Image (cartoon, rainbow, N blue to C red):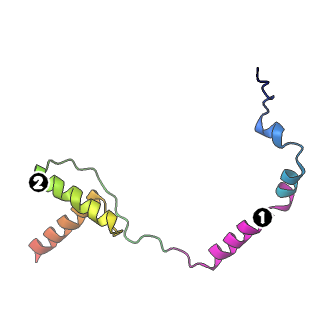
């Protein structure tokens, strides 16, 4: 028969550990994390997305042929690591092109 070890809460388990106390009192003592923080500070900040527009849900039905083509196009873009690979993005691009060509 196996003897079960007594279970402790996390707070109790960490209560009297010197390395935990040193970490909490001194901040981060790990050189790995310090190096990562320095690298992050040196990287240029990401620019926020411009013209983030609100999107609304639209439901529509497509022919089977068009739906499969959309799925294939999405998979191909994802495989090639191209941006805007989601079906939503592909449909949005196609509609933008359509409306631009009609207005010209």
Indicate the secondary structure of the residue bearing disc 2. Answer: helix
Q: Nearer the viewer, residue 76 or 4?
A: 4
Taking the spot 27% from the left edge, 64% from the top edge, the residue there is 76
Q: Nearer the viewer, residue 65 or 37?
A: 65
Q: What is the chief secondary structure element of the magenta stretch?
A: helix
Range of residues picked out in magenta:
24-46
Q: Position of residue 9 (x, y in %)?
A: 77, 34
Q: Position of residue 51 (x, y in %)?
A: 37, 70
Quadrant of residue 86 within the rendered picture:
bottom left
Taking the spot 31% from the left edge, 56% from the top edge, the residue there is 55
Q: Position of residue 92 (x, y in %)?
A: 24, 63
Taking the spot 27% from the left edge, 50% from the top edge, the residue there is 57
| Tag of residue 102 | none
Q: Which residue is mark 2?
A: 65
- The image quadrant where one finds the N terminus is top right
Please say whether residue 21 is visible from this viewpoint.
Answer: yes
Position of 23 relative to 32 (above/below): above
Q: CA distance from mark 1 to mark 2?
A: 56 Å
Please say whether residue 84 is visible from this viewpoint.
Answer: no
Q: In the rendered structure, are the residues bearing label 1 and label 2 in contact, judged by CB atoms less than 8 Å apart?
A: no
Taking the spot 15% from the left edge, 73% from the top edge, the residue there is 100
Quadrant of residue 98 within the rendered picture:
bottom left
| Tag of residue 30 | 1
């Amino acid at each position: 028969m196996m003897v079960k070890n007594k279970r402790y809460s996390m707070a109790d388990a960490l209560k009297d550990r010197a390395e935990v106390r040193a970490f909490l009192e001194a901040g981060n003592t790990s050189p790995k994390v310090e190096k990562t923080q320095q690298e992050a500070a040196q990287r240029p900040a990401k620019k926020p997305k411009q013209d983030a527009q609100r999107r609304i849900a639209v439901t529509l039905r497509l022919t089977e042929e068009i739906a499969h083509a959309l799925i294939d196009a999405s998979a191909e873009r994802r495989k090639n690591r191209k941006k805007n690979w989601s079906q939503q993005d592909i449909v949005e691009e196609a509609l933008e092109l359509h409306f631009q060509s009609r207005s010209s």
